Amino acid sequence: MGSAVLSELGTEILVPVCAVVGIVFSLVQWYLVSRVKLTAERHAPGSANKNGYNDYLIEEEEGLNDHSVVAKCAEIQSAISEGATSFLFTEYQYVGVFMVAFAILIFLFLGSVEGFSTKSQPCTYDKEKMCKPALATAIFSTVSFMLGAFTSVVSGFLGMKIATYANARTTLEARKGVGKAFITAFRSGAVMGFLLAANGLLVLYIAINLFKLYYGEDWEGLFESITGYGLGGSSMALFGRVGGGIYTKAADVGADLVGKVERNIPEDDPRNPAVIADNVGDNVGDIAGMGSDLFGSYAESSCAALVVASISSFGINHEFTSMLYPLLISSVGILVCLITTLFATDFFEIKAVKEIEPALKKQLIISTILMTVGIAIVTWIGLPSSFTIYNFGTQKVVKNWQLFLCVAVGLWAGLIIGFVTEYYTSNAYSPVQDVADSCRTGAATNVIFGLALGYKSVIIPIFAIAIGIFVSFSFAAMYGIAVAALGMLSTIATGLAIDAYGPISDNAGGIAEMAGMSHRIRERTDALDAAGNTTAAIGKGFAIGSAALVSLALFGAFVSRASISTVDVLTPKVFIGLIVGAMLPYWFSAMTMKSVGSAALKMVEEVRRQFNTIPGIMEGHAKPDYATCVKISTDASIKEMIPPGALVMLTPLIVGTFFGVETLSGVLAGSLVSGVQIAISASNTGGAWDNAKKYIEAGASEHARTLGPKGSEPHKAAVIGDTIGDPLKDTSGPSLNILIKLMAVESLVFAPFFATHGGLLFKIF
């Protein structure tokens, strides 16, 4: 079989060094962003340099008061930052209580498998060997759960802080040119992307090494207890995504329905009482929520690969370098993304609006090409020429080039999903233009066209996922699927940078409008935002595609750990699970959609009340009560996030305990199959409606101008479509990928308990 070229010592050095490089790079990007000052400074004409810190300003051309504009931007940024920080602290207090309660539950359930015995037990997969007691698995799983939860919370919070730090700076840079604003927004996104990828990798690596001190030769127990890390990450992501999604969409829908449709005032107009809440929502939903979500995907795919590998030849023969192959992929991914980021910020300079979207798309292509080379190198140095992989009771011989193809197929499937998503959600292509055209006859036809587009957009991504699953499973069974998911997530730093760029640009446009800046600056920030809208949809496509592969890999690990030889759909136990599992995404979507609706209802009533009762608000003489709207969004999201969260977290526990592992395997399969379809169609429908509205507003083509301008009947129909799509694309759709991953990883963590004590109802009857 041979051994890996890279020594154990080399692995011990390479992984943490790459993680530290990622953290240092993110701090350098943050420093460069911080050089844009939120204070008024005079600029000498003609003293521009490449990075644009001393450029001629639009205000100086137009004779506007530079000092008051900058002060106003700083004031608005401060309000948004305070609102976002306040919401996250409130959310984390509630989530913290849950985290502690669930950690106790993990300890009690897993500890009770062997009656809290401290004696060594025969290993699950090799009864001749002795492994550490179940009590140790309970303790270490609880610790890794807390570690994952804490890292997820920190990732989301840091992302939110850098986004609120950068939004006004992006607005101010737009005075110098669209290229300068783009670089500021993108660098800020990169701070979040690299911090999250590097922190996730470093914490997981440290946890493995610390756990190894106790477990020693028992790698089966070691990596089983590490699965709690993925569970912790996704648990926090669920509440972050759902809570943040409800917050942002309640504010957005309230602001749009009253401000744009009823009062006919522009988006982000300072006269709109919900405008600050709307901008806060962009950060807590799209930044903190997305950060926690992708961190959860990364943690789970790593854990799934490690669990499967621990019972294969890597784990049996204690080959440390080969065992950490998933971490080596992520390590090289950080270096690849670092080089890719320089293409956007340093190697090329954006000079025109039309270059923004191609620059972002090039990031995806460059990172994918470079990562393919990186995977080839890692596979050559990190794996022996051939090895065996555990495949449901048998050992399957795999060549290292076959595993390379598994990772590469996941990587390229991600790119395909990304570009298909872009085709269906960008207003540069016919699908969104057709949706915009349908607004000529009103909101009803707009809704019909948008729904049809969403359903159709599912086809190619599902084929890409299906081909990825077939190829990777054929070559390396469930381990192949796990590393294919890691391949899709290997460029997570670049993906997150592109994704975070969108809300930062959106906030920058809002600040420009509220600060009363020149219309030319608003045009630049709108161009940045439109490109960010499409890339945000691409990011959601990546998240959903990777979730499908991750949950399937976790499903395979669960089936192996629960000692299920086959999952037979024709048996009643499995079939009832399958049907119930397929229903869960609909139940979950109904809860989250209704939550947004009821929160938006309160917001609409409050905004209407202020417009009707505060004299001079429409004339701009009186200041709206922004704080009340922020409070409505905060209270509603905290209250409404608990039922959907409870549904996801309790389902595996109830099904596994009362109906057993066979029924639970059906539930997991059903939720995966229906959840992926609904998530893709919901995200793309919402994205298409949003960009159809922007297509009409921008009026960049002859066709768009026939539908506009703002305030026309087609535009009002487009706003209604966008409002319906908001909870689809920013709450229900993105949260569904957490549902399918979280249920799978939770089932894997509790598998020992379900296998020993599960199926109580069937035992009674």
Image (cartoon, grey):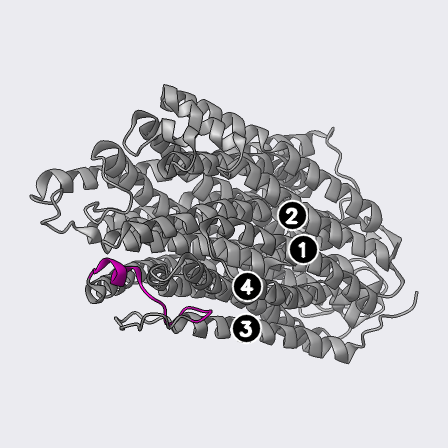
Q: Amino acid at mark 2?
A: Leu
Q: Nearer the viewer, mark 1 or mark 4?
A: 1
Inspect this view and state whether residue 530 appears: yes
Give the residue pinned by disc 4: 148
Q: Which residue is mark 1?
A: 368
Image: magenta residue range: 49-64
Badges 1 and 4: C-beta atoms under 8 Å apart? no
Q: Secondary structure at mark 3?
A: helix
The amino acid type, in three-letter code, at marker 1 is Thr
Q: Which mark is residue 25?
A: 3
Of 76 and 440, the residue lying toward us = 440
Residue at 62% across, 72% down? 207
| Label 2 or label 1, whichever comes before in sequence order | 1
**Callout 1–callout 3 Cβ contact below 8 Å:** no
Q: Is residue 236 magenta?
A: no
Asked if residue 57 lies in the magenta stretch, the reply is: yes
Reading the image, the residue beneath label 2 is: 415
Q: Quadrant of the N terminus?
A: bottom right
Q: Residue at x 18, y 37 (%)?
A: 608
Q: CA distance from mark 3 to mark 4?
A: 23 Å
Mark 1 and mark 3 lie on one chain; the one further toward the N terminus is: 3
Dot 4: few (<14), some (14–19), or many (≥20) neighbours within 10 Å?
A: many
User: How much space separates mark 2 and mark 3, taking CA atoms?
Assistant: 25 Å
Of labels 2 and 4, earlier in sequence is: 4
Q: State whether residue 651 is above or below residue 209.
A: above
The reply to whether callout 2 and callout 1 are in contact (CB within 8 Å) is: yes
